[in-house]
Structures are given as C-alpha cells and as structure tokens.
Amino acid sequence: MWKYDKKLQYPIHIQNGDLSMAKNIITQFGGPNGELAASMRYLTQRYTMPDDKGKALLTDIGTEELAHMEMISTMVYQLMQGASLQEIKQAGLEGHYTEHGFSLYPVNAQGYSFRVDYFAATGDPIADLCEDLAAEQKARAIYENLMDQTNCPDILGPLSYLRQREIVHYQRFLELYNEYLAKGYGMKKQGNCRF
C-alpha cells in the first residue's frame, strides 16, 4: 500500500543539543495535537468517507503525518544526542531517561503518554472533517509556539516546513468539507461548523 522513501521530507541536521527544545518538541510526537494523533485520526476516519476522493485525501494526509512523526522523532533524537545525565536531570527529563534512556516515546511536553482518545472518529464525514480542520489549526499554532522558543536555524527550518504543511492540510480538508456540505453528506441533523 505504501512506498517508503528512506529519506526525510525535509532534511534535519541539528548541530547542537537542546534538551529544553527536545522536551517541548516531543509534544508533536505524542501530544494530543501531534503527528501520531493526526496520522491515526485520518487513517481511521478514511474508511467512513462517503467517496473515493475523501478516502484518498485522508489516506494521503494520514500517510504524510507518519512522515512528519519521523521528522519530529529525528529532531528530538538529535536534540538529546550526547547529553550527560546531569544535563538530563537539569532539563527535568530524568523520568524519561529512567523509563526509556535516549529512546523515543510518545509523550506530550509535560511527559504524559500518548492516549488513543486524542483522536476522534464518528463515522460522520462532516463531524470528522470539522475535527480535522481544528486539529490542523491546533498543530499549526503549536509549531508557531515552538518557533517562538528558538533562534536556531537548524530547528526553525524543519518547524517552519511542518507548520506550512499544516496550513496546506487545513486547506485541503476545507475544500473537501465544503464539497461534502454542498452534497448534504452527514446532514442527518441540522447544525455543523461553518468555515
């Protein structure tokens, strides 16, 4: 089903470790608005889209979110690489180190583990696309918040790329949402979000 290209969508070469940024960026791996949640949300919702166009769009974007998860994981790994135990303790990452060493684990910025209830699938295409639109906007906002916390071009480049992809995904979902709304899909009861 998928062809795996063994390179990142955007090159990541972080020269200097930064445990504080690693601790914050990891939320885009295991947080409620991160790439793991997005990929699972879209790859789950695709089955109940009313046509092949919707199924294809959710499959495409869900697959791209898996690639973004790989980018985030690479960033966190590079930001933590070579850190001493003392530096890990100073950054408040000793709990992570205790459980996982330098391995990656899906958590949010506060260290709470990924939860499956971070993503929703109702079977209603309008409701699910509203969820997807909101998810893309939340992810965009988080990338902007992360970008506010660094001046490092090695970090800003990939974060900016990922932020831009969230905007593109939002636009694609909005187009599909408007098309489905016009066709009356998911309109068993009146009331939906308007964009």
Image (cartoon, helix red, strand yellow):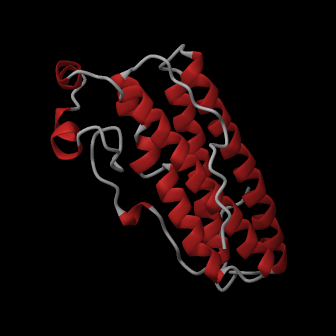
Would you say residue 18 is visible in this rendering?
A: yes
Residue 193: x percent and y percent? 66, 62
Q: Is residue 125 left or right of residue 20?
A: right
Residue at position x 67%, y 72% from top?
A: 126
Q: In this view, does 103 lie to the left or right of 32?
A: left
In this view, which residue lies farthest toward the front? 6
Residue 177: x percent and y percent? 75, 66
The quadrant where residue 16 appears: top left
Residue 40: x percent and y percent? 51, 65
In this view, which residue lies farthest toward the bottom? 188
Q: In this view, does 181 lie above or below 140?
A: below
Q: Quadrant of the N terminus?
A: bottom right
Q: In this view, does 11 lie above or below 148?
A: below
Q: Quadrant of the C terminus?
A: bottom right
The quadrant where residue 81 appears: top left
Residue at position x 52%, y 37% from top?
A: 142
The quadrant where residue 190 appears: bottom right
Residue 15 or 160: which is nearer the viewer? Answer: 15
Residue 6 or 66: which is nearer the viewer? Answer: 6
Residue 107: x percent and y percent? 33, 47
Residue at position x 59%, y 74% from top?
A: 45
Residue at position x 34%, y 55% from top?
A: 114
